[in-house]
Amino acid sequence: MTNPAPSTPPALPPISAKLAHYPSLRGQRVFVTGGGTGIGAAIVTAFAQQGAQVAFVDLAQDESEVLVHDISAAGHPAPWWRLCDVRDVAALQAAIAAACAELGDFSTLVNNVARDDRHSIESVTPEYWDERMAVNQRPAFFAIQSIVPGMKRLGGGSIINFGSTGWQTKGSDYPCYAIAKSSVNGLTRGLAGSLGPHRIRVNTVSPGWVMTQRQIKLWLNAEGEESIKRNQCLPDKLQPSDVARMALFLASDDAAMCTAQEFKVDAGWN
């Protein structure tokens, strides 16, 4: 059985003259987990548009190949990518090692990969719990473990862990996801002190309800539209590119003294 052809993705957004360009990102090497679709694809695109050399892993082969093609066709550095299931720690660390061997040490790591699958308290088994943590919690630590030696060789770096505001607003449809994402701030603050002397910065980016294709298809309905209007301070829907721009700032030299912090991009919801 062959996979169905992917739907045509939106064209790469142009680089707006009104948005920031970061000279410190040009030529830098950036590794992104879950970079093939959604927020991850926006992050990969944003860094490539800044002239960075991006590497990423993902399970979405068709979408990842289209993304790499489109970025390269737009005249930006073609991302390195590998098919990888981050639940397999050995495979994740092997992919990072392969990217380092080919491209060099990475100055930025973006721990983006996650899935907010809905589930009830009653339905969770130990096996399901372990599988959810294997996607939403464990990969971030082991990616950091693999990336940090190279950052030390470079004399510094930026680790950007993706959290969520969902657990902070008491979202009740994904307890395992909420638990995993609430631990991201602990990961950030727990490592910032030990890595700080090496000039490695560690921060959390916590998005609100971002309008990825997955979110629109699975969760956005009339009730959701009303919830956005009621809870956001700003009237516009949050886009993946809005979140990616925060990652650019935190990776740049402009954020040289930012560490151990959580930065929310949620249009004022939380």
Image (spheres, helix red, strand yellow):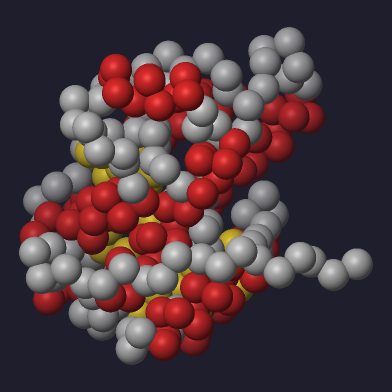
Relative height, residue 255 to residue 124 (above, below): below
Q: Give how far across and how far down residue 78 sits, in percent.
A: 43, 84
The answer to whether any part of residue 190 appears in the image is: no
Farthest residue to the right: give it. 1
Farthest residue to the top: give it. 122
Q: Judge left or right: residue 246 versus residue 40.
A: left
Q: Judge left or right: residue 151 versus residue 115.
A: left
Relative height, residue 115 to residue 70 (above, below): above
Residue ID at (27%, 50%): 242
The foreground one among 228 and 111 is: 228
| Label tally | 0
The quadrant the N terminus occupies is: bottom right
Residue ID at (39%, 41%): 210
The answer to whether any part of residue 9 appears in the image is: yes
Q: Give how far across and how far down residue 98 sits, in percent.
A: 56, 78
The quadrant the C terminus occupies is: top left
Q: Give how far across and how far down residue 29 sits, in percent.
A: 34, 75
Q: Give how far across and how far down residue 186 sits, in percent.
A: 37, 31
Q: Judge left or right: residue 186 versus residue 90.
A: left
Residue ID at (23%, 65%): 156
Q: Judge left or right: residue 131 versus residue 206.
A: right
The foreground one among 91 and 226 is: 226
Residue ID at (38%, 20%): 226
The foreground one among 154 and 37 is: 37
Relative height, residue 75 to residue 62 (above, below): below
The image quadrant that residue 106 belongs to is: bottom left
The image quadrant that residue 85 belongs to is: bottom right
The image quadrant that residue 148 belongs to is: bottom left
